[in-house]
Amino acid sequence: MEKPCRSAARARRHWTGGNERRRATRRSRPDKIMRLHAQTAAFENGRVLLPSRAPWLADYVTELTSFPGSRYDDQVDSTTQALDHLRLRRPMYISPELLEKSRLPGPRSRFY
């Protein structure tokens, strides 16, 4: 399976006629590095769970473990943003009325 960024680069070359210069190296911005550094405790403490078998798992782990020296960092960036969002999100509150309605037998509306 081709990485999305590779297919985007291929499409860009197609539409620009291939006249685009390639960068020799890609440097990650410091904010990406700091976001990953802020999430290392979640990884180290086992709070980030990955499936044991997935077709994308090897590429994903390789990208995470080779950052910031790797060519691609899109998955690292989206992972750290998602973990940050989950960490800062407040717990969901379910009102006692809604909880009681869920226990009642009979037809229910999606929206109560």
Image: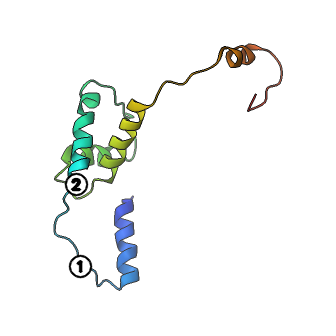
Query: How many numbered marks, from 0 up?
Result: 2
Q: Amino acid at mark 1?
A: Arg
Image location (x, y in percent) of residue 91: 49, 24
Viewer can see residue 2: no
Viewer can see residue 58: yes
Tell me where residue 46 sits by quadrant: top left
According to the picture, the residue beneath numbered tag 1 turns out to be 21
Image location (x, y in percent) of residue 66: 19, 48
In terms of secondary structure, where does tag 1 sit?
loop
Instruction: Report the residue at 18% width, 50% height from top.
Output: 68
Pointer 1 local density, CA inside 10 Å: few below 14, some 14–19, many at least 20: few
According to the picture, the residue beneath numbered tag 2 turns out to be 29
Q: Amino acid at mark 2?
A: Arg
| 38 sits to left or right of 78 | left
Q: Quadrant of the C terminus?
A: top right
Pointer 2 local density, CA inside 10 Å: few below 14, some 14–19, many at least 20: few
Q: Quadrant of the N terminus?
A: bottom left
In terms of secondary structure, where does tag 2 sit?
loop
Tell me where residue 36 sits by quadrant: top left
Pick whichever, 63 or 55, lies toward us: 63
Image location (x, y in percent) of residue 34: 22, 43
Position above or below: 27 against 34: below
Q: Between tags 1 and 2, which lies in front?
A: 2
Instruction: Report the residue at 57% width, 22% height from top.
Output: 93
Instruction: Report the residue at 47% width, 27% height from top.
Output: 90
Pick whichever, 60 or 106, lies toward us: 106
